[in-house]
Image: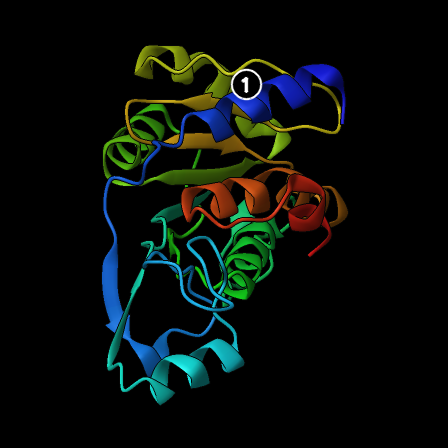
């Protein structure tokens, strides 16, 4: 990743509030993979991802619930008038949206249940409504766009108060609103996977206060 990309990612990670604004209590039996937020115990401290042995230790103490950091809320969009939805009939000059399902699968692998919209035409009103609402409602907003949609997005984003610098060919455009972290990812599968591993995974980890360094998060 280029130095400019590193600087932008560092800014996103530094935007996470410390200490955490809140925690939540979940059933011990359902806490696998959640990030521990309770007081330090033998072999367990805040920031640890709970594994099966942690669950057993907590249950052996007679605990029914455990304090964890909340999962971040994530919205997923694909923009492009040429995009088809699963089940549509093939049509000349159009292609099926693969980026959004891939992003949902990658997020699910991180334990994140995202909210995804059907592929949206790159019409100004649709872009303004979709991204405008998401910026006020979600912790992370991820989107991809066809080449034809990119020009419309670049024209509309400043009207939403979004300035998204290009950090380098291997880094996404990224921006921070009062609540959301917005990342414009490449739609090509290999590039999307690389950007997800290099940018989205570390951000999700930081938002859950997971005690792992960026290199570990990117290789997970």
Q: x and y percent of residue 208 in the render?
A: 42, 49
Secondary-structure class at tag 1: helix
Where is residue 214, by image quadrant? top right
Q: x and y percent of residue 89 in the render?
A: 54, 63
Q: Residue at x 51, y 68 (%)?
A: 43
Where is residue 158, by image quadrant? top left
Residue 118 or residue 84, whichever sits in front: 118
In the displayed structure, does residue 7 sit left or right of residue 86? Answer: right
For residue 35, above or below residue 53: above
Residue 52 or residue 112, whichever sits in front: 52
Q: Residues within 10 Å of mark 1 (few under 14, many from 20)?
A: few
In the displayed structure, does residue 59 sit left or right of residue 209? Answer: left
In the displayed structure, does residue 148 sit left or right of residue 55? Answer: right
Q: Residue at x 47, y 40 (%)?
A: 142
Q: x and y percent of residue 192 in the render?
A: 67, 44
Q: Which image quadrant: the C terminus? A: bottom right
Q: Residue at x 69, y 49 (%)?
A: 216
- Residue behind mark 1: 151
Q: How is the image coloured?
A: rainbow
Q: x and y percent of residue 126 in the render?
A: 32, 33
Total labels drawn = 1
For residue 175, above or below residue 51: above
Q: Which image quadrant: the N terminus? A: top right
Q: Is residue 178 visible?
A: yes
Q: Is residue 81 visible?
A: no
Q: Residue at x 54, y 47 (%)?
A: 83
């Amino acid at each position: 990743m280029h130095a400019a990309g590193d600087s932008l990612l560092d800014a996103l990670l530094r935007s996470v509030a410390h200490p955490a604004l809140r925690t939540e209590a979940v059933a011990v039996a359902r806490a696998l993979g959640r990030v521990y937020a309770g007081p330090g115990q033998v072999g367990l401290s805040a920031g640890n991802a709970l594994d099966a042995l942690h669950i057993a230790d907590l249950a052996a103490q007679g605990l029914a619930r455990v304090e964890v950091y909340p999962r971040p809320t994530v919205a997923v969009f694909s923009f492009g008038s040429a995009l088809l939805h699963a089940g549509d009939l093939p049509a000349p000059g159009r292609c099926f949206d693969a980026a959004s399902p891939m992003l949902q699968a990658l997020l699910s692998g991180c334990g994140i249940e995202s909210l995804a919209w059907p592929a949206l035409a790159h019409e100004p009103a649709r872009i303004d409504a979709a991204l405008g609402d998401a910026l006020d409602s979600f912790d992370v907003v991820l989107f991809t766009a066809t080449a034809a949609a990119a020009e419309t997005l670049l024209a509309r984003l400043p009207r939403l108060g979004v300035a998204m610098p290009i950090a380098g060919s291997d880094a996404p455009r990224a921006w921070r609103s009062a609540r959301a972290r917005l990342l414009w990812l490449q739609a090509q599968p290999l590039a999307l996977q690389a950007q997800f591993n290099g940018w989205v995974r570390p951000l999700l980890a930081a938002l859950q206060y997971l005690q792992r360094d960026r290199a570990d998060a990117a290789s997970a």
